[in-house]
Image (cartoon, rainbow, N blue to C red):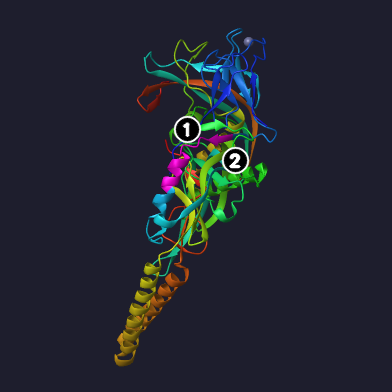
Amino acid sequence: MAMIVKNLKCSSCGAPLKAKEADLILFCTSCGKTMEFKDSDVGEVSPHILAPVREDKDLIYLPFWGIDADVVVMHEDTVGGFLRITKKPMRGACRFYVCAADLLPRKTAGWNLEFTRNFPKATEIPDFRGILHMPAVKSSRTAEKDAEFLFLKHEIDLSGTLQELEYTFSILGHELYYIPFLRRGDDLRPAV
Amino acid sequence: MSSVPNLLIGLSCPGCGGAVDVTEGSRLAFCPYCGSALAIIADDAGVARLMYKMDVTETEAESAARKWFGAFPKARDLAATAVITEIFPMYLPFWSMVGTGKGIACGYSTHTNKDGHTQTTYHEDSSDAEYLWSVIACQTGDLGIVTPPELNGRLLPYTEGDIPVFETTSSRDEAYDQADTDIRMEAHRRAASGIETLTFSKTFCIPREFSLLYYPYWIIRYQYRERDYFVVLDGVSGSPVSGRAPGDQTYQALAAGLGAGFGGLFAGLGIAYAMFSDSEYALAGLSGLVIGLILVLAGYWMFRFGSEVTEGKLTGGISFSMKGFGQKTVREIER
Ligand SMILES: [Zn+2]
């Protein structure tokens, strides 16, 4: 009845995977591929690493899941409000960004909404360039629920007061992003 | 409000044999010596079984019990005359989940203005927080410990047979579903507060860790004037969580006497007021009568049940401790 411990191996080249801390994202030192830990094994993912706006000794990368979903709204009833010009409703194929680092919702909720509404236009770079990155503790599968909540959160943030909503939310896929942040004490701010 | 418990357990690396620290409930770990990434595969039921380290020694438990014997309003000679008949460690299982609860609630509330017009206010609200959910996983019989302890202390992997435990009587799936429901309900309660009529709502529970935790206690059985009593102490903090003790006959008699005395006085004054004053004061007289009757009843209740003092969630007896009351199984995590 005790717990069993198993060595994890790269799904691409078979080399044993190494880690410095418990991180759902593992980097193979042998072939350079990136692996996502799922349940008891690993599968390959391609990370998108964004370049920071400027170099700084306090930079740190935070992992985010980019969840793709198809949003279909069958019925909606809203009271009051003006034309939805500044914030547009999300319909059809949409991308939702969910922070995967070990931080409380209080901290991550704002970034998730901000990136989902307006993802930073930054160039992608092939590696972290020696900048530290936070471990991912949220799996891509659990991030799907966060994505659906983000859709609803965006809906109620729109002009007018939402009263009724009938919708379907189908997952299309996911991508991994590393976004640079500036860390000053406990404070974290996007650096893109 | 609760902080994230210290969630470290020890396992050994299959590669180099080094001690591996694992975050409780996590399926992934790494070896600090050889750096190997490791998958943790839990037992058949897919539940990580962990235990908290007993911090209180038998000697410390005994002196804590003696201190409890001497505390008001127990029999005044209890500390001097109680005979401890049994003292033993016992671990009780608790199901525990750490997860995020999210809720969306839409609807409206109506209220009537001074001029008789009905006004409708529309609401759209949300909640988003991390919670620690826990509930006892066994039957405790006469011990009465039902409230999950503050989960702190050092966590170790649990091996069957190593420690005395109460058998787990609830199923993993039931507990998991209950955790999911309770966290969602809390998320909904927060999002929907102040909304009279709901028109749309949706909740999510995103679990991070789910485990069976064994928490240590000291069970102390003792006799006083040839009657059996007990007290249960928290094995990490040493404080009493549940127990029965004889009450003090002096306090008991005093309470009954004061209750009847003051009760009678109020009731008498009340009747006098009601009979000899204007109708305006008759009402005040009647309330005096009611207060009097309540005091008489309270005095009787002290007399009737005051022979026993209880700690924690037990029936009968007078409980002066609020421990275990009003504590919910879902607590928000702050860090
Ligand atoms: Zn590889």
Q: Position of residue A150 (x, y in %)?
A: 53, 36
Asked if residue B114 can be seen in this view, the reply is no
B87 and B123: which is toward the camera: B87
Q: Position of residue B300 (x, y in %)?
A: 43, 75
Sequence-wise, the earlier of marks 1 and 2 is 1
Q: Position of residue A29 (x, y in %)?
A: 57, 9
Name the quarter showing ligand 1.
Answer: top right
- What is the chain identity of the residue bearing mark 2? B
What is the C-alpha distance between the residues marked 1 and 2? Answer: 23 Å
For the point 40% across and 16% down, the residue is A53
Q: Secondary structure at mark 2?
A: loop
- What is the chain identity of the residue bearing mark 1? B
Classify residue A91 by image quadrant.
top right
Residue, far bottom: B276
Magenta stretch, residue numbers:
B50-64
Residue, far top: A30
Could you say which disc has been placed on residue B164 in the image? 2
B295 above or below B176?
Answer: below
Q: Is residue B62 magenta?
A: yes
Q: Callout 1, which amino acid?
A: Asn
Q: Secondary structure at mark 1?
A: loop
Classify residue B281 by image quadrant.
bottom left
* A44 displayed left or right of B109: right
Q: Callout 2, which amino acid?
A: Pro
Disc 1 designates what residue? Answer: B6
Label 2 environment density (alpha carbons within 10 Å; few <14, some 14–19, many ≥20): few
